[in-house]
Structure formats: structure tokens, C-alpha cells
Image (tube, rainbow, N blue to C red):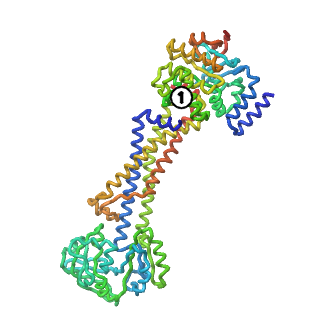
């Protein structure tokens, strides 16, 4: 039944009907069935560097429940960033399937993936997180601008969000005028302000000192609890692993351990 | 916010922005200023040609243009008076005789054009009215006075008060000659004009050539040269005499008309050449700006910004560079033209070479609105068009590749 609905919706999507309507209807139809926000089945990804083939993901099967606070951990080259990119629709799997909030990412065009990222995913990167020419409040507003939220509403929501992450009074500072921790807080505010289905954070504490990193994690945990947003981190930071309620260890592109706390 | 980002991005590297702005400003300035100089040269050529006994419209015998001999003079010019009476209020007209003749004195002889003029009317139509700088202008009843050009005076090694003998074919087919006394010397824009024309009164020329009241042409000067075709048509409609033909200045001066069209081509080529030089700089600058910000474009794409909005953002940067450059370039170009509008550029040192091309010694730049608009549109629209290349490049970065870029 669901695959029939999915087929009809995709046909509608490709016929040029508004992305927004598509996602709203899609979300409503899948609401009852939605237990897992992310489902990966036998995901494989191979990068080619000249004649050399590097296997980044080697048959990952993983389900992440809605509202989770999950860390993907492992050494460098274990495939955690690749997995995060594929879950976020930034990259595609070579084999296997990935669904995000009921959307089969492998069947979506680049434009559909861009729309999905805009409406369903919030990103927090390790560095180069903010748009340097925009102020803190404008950075937070940016996603809402792309979504077509009216100017007054998005300004109000952005201010409230910055207040929420502890940056009241720093609305008009450019990224270069903020500390690393403050920049990451702005990034969290931007990621969460549109109420996304999932927030993906790629080594968010890597460039921060431990006190600032801890503060950021506490903030994200609070957002996870208050906003009910799902957080997935890629990390090799012990502190992030301690904060996570579920720890998925990767090695050589495979899940070697999956621990729930 | 896209415009805001574009505006702020161009000021991230102020030195680079300043360099490309200077390039655009110089380009636009060069387009406007050089275009105005070319228009000034062409305009001056037209004005000189019209002032040199051409006028905007001429009435001649139908055969005179192909065979300008005394037999093809206008037979009864007085019959044209009603038509001339219906000319626009700001139009002026005169009748004159113009024939080839030989001028001679004791030492020299040379071919000239004998112009028999109505001194009062002619002064309001052609250059001779205010060209006499030595002696005096011709009086209405002056039957013996002659005005010659400065160059002819020097060539003939003569001076004011001396005699000059003119010879030409009379209406009876015989050689007609008459001695005149030099009463005035004129100077003209072109030295060739000073050597070519000698002026006597119309009655004196008619007496010498025994033409009665016949004239070779009636010349009309209008308030606005653009009205020439319309006024010529209305004159044609009012003339019943089939032997009279009406010409506009474009028909009388086909070479000048062609040169005017040629200048249109020159200006277009000039615009394109300047734009190509400027366009490479612009594309290079935008490309540099794009490749410096690969990770940033990756971030924008990651956040869900669609490729067309990335294109719009890069084009916004180009838009601001072009807008500022065009605005300042326009102001500088128009200011340069304004500064030279009084005195012009004196090229007397190259007078002979310039005369060969029919140009004046002093060039006063003239701004045509259509040239300014063409220059601005060329820079603006083509500038945006070529900026599409770096913009599309920026839009094609995939988020993962761009974010991995170092």
C-alpha cells in the first residue's frame, strides 16, 4: 500500500507540483508508520582515486529511531562522515537503500535531495559552518529564507532561537566577530530553527576546547529533548560518545558495535 | 538576502574589487568619450559640408547635378518664390551662382569655384557670413569686389586691394572674363575651402556670365537638419515645374552620408573591442572569487540552496560591479565631454592630414544618447551574460566535493 502511495507521490513530484506540498503530504501519510527516522539497508560506497578503489561503506545496515541522540564513532577512514553525508542526502550510496523520514533517497533527483535537505535536515559542520558575509541572525534566517518563510516571522524565530542557544545580544555579529563556540551555537540555531526531522553534526566539537565543546553538547542535548529533534553525530571525541544515548562504532565501513545507553 | 550577500561578497576583497571596478570604469569611459569624439568628428564634417555652400536642401535644374554647366541653371527662380514663402519659420534660403572658373593675376592662375551670392541672405546660411577676417564683406551692390580665401591669397602672392581676373564660360558660349578687386579675405575650417572658393555678388556674376536672372541653385538652411527629408517632400509637392529637382543634404553629400554610417560601424567595433578586453578581466575576477569560496558554495548547497539561486548570487556580485562601474564610467565620460565641449581638442598640428579626411582642426566631442545607452547596455547585458560562466561553475559544485575542497 505504502509503495503504491509512494509511486503516486513521486509521479506527482516529477510532474512539477510544489516541493513543499509534496513533503507535507508525504510526512502526513507516513506519520503513523514512522518509528525509524533513518533506515539504511546494506549500504555500500566505494570511492575511486585513480585506479585505486577505496571502500568507504561496506554493507551498512542501520536504523535510527525518531528523537535519537546518536553518535557514529570510529577511527579516521571508518566511513562515519560518508554515512552521515549519505543519510543527509549530500552523497549517494552505490548500493543498498537509505530512507530518511520515509523518503527513499536513492530514487530522488538532485533537486529533490536539495529540497529534502532544506526542509528535513539541519547540518552542523566541523568548520566553515557559517556564511561569512551574513550576521548571526541572518545565518539563522538563511534556511527559512530558502523555505519562503515571511521576513518578519523568520526574523522573530531567528532571534528567539539565538536567545535559546545563549547568544542574545550577538544577533548582528559576523562570524569573524564570534568565537568558535559561538559560531557552532549559531550553526546549531540555524540547524534547529526550521524544526527539521534530523540534525546531522559532523565532528561538531573537533575545533573547540573541551569546556566549549561540553557546552555545545549540552545545548544540543537540550534541543534534542525540548524540540524532539533527532541528532546524529560523527565523532571520535570521547566526550561526544559519553553524551550520546546510542553509540554506533564503525570500522572499515562496517558497524562493529551498536550500544544503547 | 541574495542581493545583500552579493553586495557584501564584492567587498570581501576590496583590492580585487577596486581593480575590476577601475577596468569597468575605464572601459565605459573609453566607450562614451571615444564615441563622443567620433561623433564630434562626424558632426563637424557634416556641419562643414553643409556650411560650405550646400545647405540642408537645394533646388536645382534637373540636369545640373550631372552636368553642372551654365546651360543647366534654374531658368526662372522667381517662380519658386511661393514655395519658398511656405518654408518653416526658422528656415532661411538664398539663391546663388556656382560655376567653375579660372582665377589669375600677374603671377599665378588656378582653377576655382566662382560663387555669386546674395550677400545678405548668404551670410545667414553659409560659413562666409562670419569668415571674413581681413578687409570687408561684400556689399549688396558691390559689382567689382571679390572675397578670396587666405590660402589662395598666399598662393597667388597677392593682398587686399589688388586685382584678380576671373574667366569662365558665359551663357553665350564664349569665354567671359572680368577683373575684380580683392575687398576681403576669409578663412575656413578647411584649407582646401580657402583655395577653392571666391565670392562675388550675384549681380556681378550674372553680369559677367550674361545669365540674366538665372541662378545655379537655391539653398535652404533649416532650424533642424533632421527635418530635411520632410521639408524637401513638402517642397516637391508644391513645385509644378518638372525641370526643378529638390535634393536633401544626404543626396548632395553622399560621401558624408556614407562616412556617417561608417562611423556607426566604427563605434560598434570600438564598443566590442573595449568590452572584450574588459570582459576577460570581469570573468577572471568572478572566477577567482568563485574558486576562493568553493567550500562556501558547498555549504550553501548543503543547506538546500538550489543551483539557480547560487547562479543568482554570483550574478548579483557581477551586477553590482557592473552597475557601479557603469555609473562612474558614465559620469566620468560625460564630465570629460563637458570639459571639452567649449574649447574642443585642437589638432591644428595635423591640419593637413585631417583635411585630407575632411575633418576639422578642432574636434568638439558630441554625446549621442543612443551611444551612451548602447555602451551601457553592451557592458551591462554582455557583462552579465559572460558572468554566467563562473556562476554556472559555482552552481555545479556538488556539496560533498566542495566541502572537501581545501
> x%, y% of residue B380?
48, 47
Q: Residue B197: horizontal and vertical position, in percent?
A: 29, 75
Q: Residue at x 43, y 67 (%)?
A: B257
Whether residue B20 is visible, yes or no, is: yes
Vertical side of A85 occupied by B395: above or below: below
- The correct choice, above or below, for B177 with respect to B368 in the image is below
In front of the other: B274 or B249: B249
Location of residue A39 in the rendering, given as x and y in whole percent from the top left corner? 71, 21
Question: In the image, B160: left or right of B41?
Answer: left
Which of B89 and B268 lies nearest the eye of the viewer?
B89
The answer to whether A148 is drawn above or below residue A34 in the figure is below
Q: Residue B76 appears in which quarter of the rendering? A: bottom left
Q: Residue at x 63, y 15 (%)?
A: A72
Q: Using the image, name the chain to which the residue with label 1 belongs.
A: A
Left or right position of A79 against B129? right
Taking the image as drawn, is residue A55 in sight?
A: no
Indicate the quadrant where residue A8 lies: top right
Residue that mark 1 sits on? A139
Q: Quadrant of residue A33?
A: top right
For mark 1, give the secondary structure: helix
Residue depicted at 67% across the width and 25% down the height: A94
Q: Residue at x 68, y 10 (%)?
A: A260
Count of labels in the image: 1
Residue at far right of view: A1
Q: Closest to the observer: B279 or B90? A: B90
* Number of residues whose C-alpha sits closer than 10 Å to that of mark 1, classed few (under 14), some (14–19) or many (20 or more): many
Q: Residue B365 placed where, x, y %?
A: 35, 58
Amino acid at each position: 500500500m505504502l509503495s503504491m502511495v509512494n509511486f503516486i507521490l513521486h509521479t506527482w513530484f516529477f510532474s512539477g507540483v510544489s516541493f513543499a506540498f509534496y513533503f507535507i503530504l508525504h510526512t502526513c501519510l507516513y506519520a503513523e508508520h514512522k518509528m525509524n527516522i533513518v533506515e539504511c539497508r546494506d549500504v555500500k560506497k566505494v570511492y575511486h582515486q585513480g585506479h585505486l578503489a577505496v571502500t568507504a561503506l561496506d554493507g551498512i545496515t542501520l536504523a535510527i529511531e525518531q528523537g535519537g541522540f546518536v553518535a557514529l564513532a570510529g577511527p579516521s577512514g571508518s566511513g562515519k562522515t560518508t554515512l552521515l553525508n549519505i543519510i543527509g542526502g549530500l552523497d549517494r550510496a552505490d548500493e543498498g537503500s537509505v530512507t530518511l523520514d520515509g523518503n527513499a533517497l536513492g530514487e530522488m533527483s538532485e533537486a529533490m535531495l536539495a529540497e529534502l535537505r532544506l526542509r528535513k535536515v539541519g547540518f552542523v559542520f566541523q568548520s566553515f559552518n557559517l556564511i561569512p558575509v551574513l550576521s548571526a541572525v541572518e545565518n539563522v534566517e538563511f534556511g527559512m529564507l530558502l523555505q519562503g518563510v515571511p521576513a518578519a516571522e523568520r526574523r522573530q524565530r531567528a532571534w528567539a532561537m539565538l536567545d535559546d542557544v545563549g547568544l542574545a545580544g550577538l544577533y548582528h555579529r559576523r562570524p569573524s566577530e564570534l568565537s568558535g563556540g559561538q559560531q557552532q551555537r549559531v550553526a546549531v540555531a540555524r540547524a534547529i530553527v526550521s524544526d527539521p526531522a534530523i540534525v546531522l553534526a559532523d565532528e561538531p566539537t573537533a575545533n573547540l576546547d573541551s569546556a566549549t565543546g561540553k557546552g555545545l553538547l549540552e545545548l544540543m542535548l537540550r534541543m534534542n529533548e525540548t524540540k524532539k529533534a533527532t541528532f546524529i553525530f560523527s565523532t571520535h571525541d570521547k566526550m561526544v560518545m559519553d553524551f550520546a544515548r546510542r553509540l554506533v562504532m564503525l570500522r572499515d565501513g562496517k558497524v562493529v558495535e551498536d550500544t544503547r545507553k | 538576502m541574495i542581493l545583500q550577500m552579493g553586495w557584501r561578497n564584492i567587498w570581501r576583497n576590496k583590492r580585487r574589487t577596486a581593480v575590476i571596478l577601475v577596468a569597468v570604469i575605464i572601459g565605459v569611459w573609453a566607450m562614451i568619450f571615444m564615441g563622443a569624439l567620433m561623433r564630434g568628428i562626424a558632426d563637424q564634417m557634416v556641419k562643414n559640408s553643409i556650411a560650405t555652400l550646400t545647405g540642408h536642401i537645394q533646388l536645382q535644374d534637373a540636369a545640373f547635378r550631372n552636368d553642372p554647366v551654365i546651360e543647366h541653371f534654374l531658368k526662372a527662380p522667381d517662380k519658386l518664390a511661393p514655395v519658398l514663402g511656405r518654408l518653416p519659420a526658422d528656415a532661411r534660403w538664398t539663391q546663388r551662382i556656382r560655376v567653375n572658373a579660372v582665377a589669375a593675376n600677374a603671377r599665378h592662375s588656378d582653377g576655382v569655384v566662382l560663387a555669386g551670392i546674395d550677400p545678405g541672405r548668404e551670410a545667414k546660411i553659409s560659413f562666409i557670413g562670419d569668415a571674413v577676417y581681413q578687409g570687408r564683406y561684400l556689399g549688396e551692390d558691390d559689382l567689382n569686389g571679390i572675397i578670396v580665401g587666405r590660402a589662395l591669397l598666399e598662393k597667388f602672392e597677392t593682398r587686399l586691394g589688388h586685382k584678380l581676373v576671373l574667366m569662365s564660360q558665359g551663357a553665350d558660349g564664349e569665354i567671359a572674363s572680368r577683373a575684380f578687386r580683392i575687398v576681403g579675405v576669409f578663412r575656413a575650417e578647411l584649407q582646401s575651402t580657402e583655395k577653392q572658393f571666391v565670392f562675388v555678388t550675384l549681380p556681378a556674376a550674372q553680369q559677367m556670365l550674361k545669365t540674366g536672372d538665372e541662378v545655379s541653385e537655391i539653398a535652404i538652411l533649416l532650424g533642424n537638419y533632421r527635418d530635411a527629408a520632410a521639408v524637401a517632400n513638402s517642397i516637391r509637392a508644391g513645385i509644378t515645374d518638372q525641370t526643378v529637382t529638390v535634393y536633401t543634404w544626404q543626396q548632395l553629400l553622399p560621401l558624408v552620408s556614407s562616412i556617417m554610417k561608417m562611423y556607426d560601424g566604427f563605434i560598434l567595433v570600438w564598443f566590442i573591442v573595449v568590452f572584450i578586453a574588459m570582459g576577460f578581466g570581469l570573468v577572471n575576477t568572478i572566477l577567482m572569487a568563485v574558486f576562493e569560496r568553493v567550500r562556501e558554495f558547498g555549504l550553501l548547497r548543503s543547506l538546500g540552496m538550489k543551483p539557480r539561486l547560487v547562479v543568482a548570487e554570483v550574478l548579483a556580485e557581477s551586477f553590482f560591479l557592473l552597475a557601479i562601474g557603469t555609473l562612474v564610467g558614465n559620469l566620468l565620460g560625460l564630465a570629460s565631454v563637458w570639459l571639452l565641449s567649449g574649447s574642443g581638442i585642437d589638432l591644428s598640428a595635423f591640419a593637413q592630414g585631417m583635411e585630407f579626411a575632411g575633418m576639422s582642426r578642432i574636434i568638439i566631442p558630441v554625446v549621442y544618447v543612443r551611444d551612451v545607452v548602447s555602451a551601457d547596455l553592451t557592458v551591462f547585458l554582455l557583462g552579465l551574460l559572460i558572468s554566467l560562466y563562473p556562476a554556472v561553475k559555482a552552481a555545479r559544485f556538488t556539496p560533498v566535493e566542495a566541502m572537501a575542497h581545501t
